[in-house]
Structure formats: structure tokens, C-alpha cells
Image (cartoon, rainbow, N blue to C red):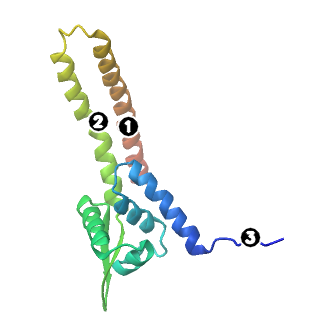
Amino acid sequence: MAKQEQPGPDALLQAKVEQLGIAFERLGQSPMNARVMGFLLIAEPPYQDFYQIRDFLSASKSSISNALNFLMNEGTVDYLTFSGDRRRYFRINTDNWLQNLKRQTLQMGQMRLLLDKVLEERSESEYLEFNEGLQEIIEFQDFIAKGIELMIRKWEEREDKV
């Protein structure tokens, strides 16, 4: 009976990066941005230079460069340097990522205001079922927004105690 070979550590790491990449794609990232994020999240050390990223992902210089520039502009990725080393090492900026998450959750209130105006504009519509659906979305957003605001306050109080 032939012994089945187990995938090596690189193959396992590649599979994990691919899984993360698919998840980030589903959240709206482009495929290359998603894979760069996935790699930087799992890589040891948690910072990698341009060529390490390119070699691991087997991608062109331009696609890696475009992905890194996009992620840096977005604030998800930044870089660090080490004295005596001219290379830049890219990493996930966890502080900015957390701030972006907070900002995105709080932006739900803006969508609620927009939907209020839409519902007001539709006040004379004969399509009541659609309007009721919009009203339910507004109520759901209110419910979620209140819970999120409370959770953020509790999170920040926890940070103050640490």
C-alpha cells in the first residue's frame, strides 16, 4: 500500500492564504489585495518585504505594487524599515484596521438618514409592501446601531482599564 504524502508547510500556508483571500474577496477586496492581506496576516514574521510577498504569491511586480499601494492608501497596510536595511517591510496596520471597522459600523447611521429621506419621498406610493420593507430595514439599522455604539463604548472602557 502506497503511503500518502502530506502537504509540506509551504503548501499548507498557501492553502490558508488562499482561504483568507477568498474570504476577503467576498468582503469586497480584489483578488490580489485579498491574497496580500491573507499572506501578511499569516506570515512569520508579520511583516514581509516586497520580494517575499511577490515570491510567495507568484505574482507580477505590478500586481503586488498595485495591491500594496491600494492597501496602504486604505490604511490597512503600512510599512516599517530597519536601520541599515533599505528595504520596506509591509505589515497589516492593526490600529488603522480597528479604526476603519469602528468608522464603518458608525456609518450605518448615515444610511439610516438616507433611507428616512427615501421613505419620506415614497410616502404617497401605492407600493406599501415595499415601503414597509424599507421601514423594517430602518428599524433594524437603528437596533444594530444602538448595540454597536454600546459595544464600542464598552470596548473603549475596557481599553482604558488595561
Which residue ends up furthest to the left in the rendered image? 121
Give the alpha-carbon distance from disc 3 to disc 2, as whole Å: 51 Å
Give the alpha-carbon distance from disc 3 to disc 1, as whole Å: 49 Å
Query: In the rendered structure, which amino acid carries the disc numbered 2?
Result: Met
Q: At 23% across and 25% down in the image, what residue appears?
A: 115
Compared to 125, does 150 lie above or below? below
Asked whether residue 105 appears in the rendered view, the answer is: yes
Mark 1 and mark 2 in contact? Answer it, CB < 8 Å. Answer: yes
In terms of sequence position, does the residue under pointer 3 or pointer 1 come before the other?
A: 3
Tell me the crowding category of disc 3: few under 14, some 14 to 19, or many 20 or more residues within 10 angstroms, Cα based.
Answer: few
Q: At 44% across and 75% down in the image, what residue appears?
A: 56
Give residue 161's mark.
Answer: none
Which residue ends up furthest to the right in the rendered image? 1
Give residue 148's mark.
Answer: 1
Residue 76 place in picture, x, y as percent: 32, 60
Q: Mark 3 points at which residue?
A: 4
